[in-house]
Image: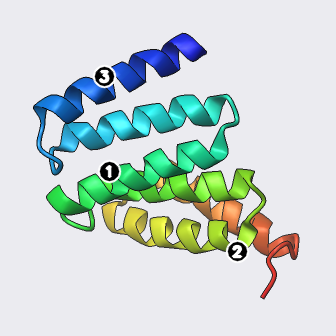
Amino acid sequence: MSSTLDYHRKALGIRRECLSNDDIRLGISYINVGLALNNINQFDEALSYYQQARIAWNQSLPYNHALIADSIHSIATIYYCKRQYGEALEYFEEALKLYKRLSPAKENAILKIENAIKDLKATDSITA
């Protein structure tokens, strides 16, 4: 897996040198590095890259764009993996609102998030 991570980090480095900070492709590279890190359970570092993707996309895309919703969903998933359920719920709910605006294209994501929210609320894992 480290070769995948290395590849995505190199691609990100190249894009940082060649592209402006608000270029959509830079956000895609941040997401790719985050996914590689998530796959090896490096959640804190993955979270940082997902947040950077969201920042990059917020600069160049309208708020209701699918990529922004995807980045918020990724952030929620990391918080869930880290057992920070209150934060996870907050981001899941935000992603859900965006995905519903994009429906039916994101129907699968909507169902996954609704199930995650239901599970979080059912487990009483969220501290007030």
Relative horizontal placement of residue 41, taking residue 48 as reference (left or right): right
Q: Quadrant of the C terminus?
A: bottom right
Which residue is located at x 54 percent, y 50 percent? Answer: 47
Q: Residues within 10 Å of mark 2 (few under 14, many from 20)?
A: some
How far, Cα to Cα, is label 2 from label 3? 34 Å
Location of residue 49 in the rendering, given as x and y in whole percent from the top left corner: 45, 45
Q: Residues within 10 Å of mark 3 (few under 14, many from 20)?
A: some
Instruction: Kindly identify which numbered label has been placed on residue 86.
Output: 2
Mark 1 or mark 2, whichever is nearer to me: 2
The type of residue carrying mark 2 is Gly
Location of residue 25 in the rendering, given as x and y in whole percent from the top left corner: 22, 36
Outermost residue, bottom direction?
Answer: 128
Location of residue 39 in the rendering, given as x and y in whole percent from the top left corner: 64, 30
Q: Earlier in the sequence, mark 3 or mark 1?
A: 3
Which residue is located at x 70 percent, y 74 percent? Answer: 86
Q: Residues within 10 Å of mark 1 (few under 14, many from 20)?
A: many
Q: Quadrant of residue 102?
A: bottom left
Mark 3 or mark 1, whichever is nearer to me: 3
Please give the residue where the numbered disc 3 appears in the rendered image: 11
| Whether residue 103 is situated above or below residue 3 in the rendered picture | below
